[in-house]
Image (cartoon, rainbow, N blue to C red):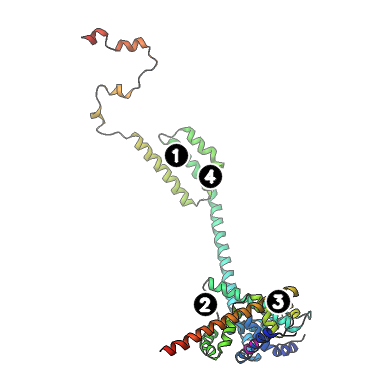
Amino acid sequence: MQLTGDEKRIQALFCELKAEDLSFTSTFENALRHAQARPSRQRQSLRTLAIMTATAIVVTTVCSQILWSQNRHDMPNAEAIIQGNATNFSTSPGISLRDVNTVRTSQQSPRLLAVRRVPRARRQKHFDSGDSIMVTAIAISKWQSPTASLVEFFGSSAFKSLPQLSGSVQELQSFLPSQKERNQ
Amino acid sequence: MEIAELKRQLEKLHIASFGWACSCCHGNRTEAEEVLQTVYLKILEGKARYRGECQLKTWLFAVIRNTAITEHRKALLRALISIPPTDSKSVCRDSGQQPVAELERSEMQTRFRHAIERLPARQRETLHLVFYQDLTLREAAVVLGISIGSTRRHYERGKKRLRDALDREEVAYAIDWRRKENSSVIL
């Protein structure tokens, strides 16, 4: 390749660079020795990584297997708990039979199936808390203030009852004072 | 090719390979050494095989280039997840050598290095292969894995950019030098 002025200048600079690089170059044997020393270290780290990964996989598999088997054993109990709770609801004051039936018929619903998968202790706790909420709700609805009788007066029934809108105009006029009474 | 023969050939090309590895690693000699070691290992373990489709030199340079790119990516990933480099010794050695090397470089060489570093990768690589390694444009195209037309374009553009950069550097250097001279006169 024929080099022009600029090219010669660039080539000269590259030659200088080459000479400088040459002084920093290690021997081939040295480089090869270093290269052959490297894989043992790399392989060791790779082996450690592989062992760690395998251990993690085994632990995860065992844990998931244990959880799955536990859930499987709990399934019949869940049905019994649901039945029991349903009867409890039916006997509780303020709960109608319709609600109980709704609970029974919804046994196949996805929501209830999800409940079945919950561990036993948690599920029991859930139902217990449901009962306690129901009892509290009933107690609150039946609560009466001890000073309520003091507020009562003779016209309270008129205030509490709604006016009869079906009454005729004549009947309503009978309640109004007459013209004479107004003039007096 | 036999392992012994391959080793002999690699030894012959070792200095040129190191220069090319330096160029691929943006002038970082420690990184270049590591890349070269990885390349030798790849070749000797049979992960990179020479099938005689091109010259051994161009094939070796292509392997060095690809390995340097891979190592650079790995280094970036390591930096992202902040893992310290595995070989801290070589890094320390390099940091110790850096000031000495800087002193040894001439002003012109330093400016030339800066100008080269600022060039786009393909242009820098093409110029290096042509002027440093004395390869033809066709051989450079094989190393870079691009067509000869693209290589020629990179070569022309790179040359022009390098010339402009060197001129600018020289002007800046002259202005700086004159300013220093004037200040010493005033003092």
The quarter of the displayed image where residue B26 is located: bottom right
Chain of the residue that carries numbered disc 4 in the rendered image: A
Q: Is mark 4 on a helix, strand or loop?
A: helix
Residue type highlighted by circle 1: Asn
Q: Which residue lies furthest to the top in this view?
A: A180
Residue type highlighted by circle 4: Arg
Q: Is mark 2 on a helix, strand or loop?
A: loop
Tags 1 and 2 both on a single chain: no
Residue type highlighted by circle 2: Pro
Chain of the residue that carries numbered disc 2 in the rendered image: B
Residue B106 x, y percent position in the rendering? 56, 90
Q: What element carries label 1?
A: helix
Badge 4: how crowded within 10 Å, few (<14), some, or many (20+)? few
Chain of the residue that carries numbered disc 1 in the rendered image: A
Q: Are marks 3 and 4 in contact (CB under 8 Å)?
A: no
Image point 48% across, 51% down: which residue? Answer: A120
- Depth check: give the residue in front, A106 or B178: B178
Tag in front: 3 or 2: 3
Residue carrying label 2: B84
Q: Do the residues labelled 3 and 2 touch (CB within 8 Å)?
A: no
- Depth check: give the residue in front, A42 or A126: A42
Residue A133 x, y percent position in the rendering? 40, 42
Q: Give the range drawn in magenta.
A: A13-17
The CA span between labels 1 and 3 is 81 Å
Residue carrying label 4: A111
The CA span between labels 2 and 4 is 50 Å
Q: What element carries label 3?
A: helix
* Image-based side of A183 in relation to B67, left or right: left
* Image-based side of B129 in relation to A68, left or right: right
In this rendering, the answer to whether A53 lies above or below A155 is: below
Chain of the residue that carries numbered disc 3 in the rendered image: B
- Depth check: give the residue in front, B130 or A104: B130
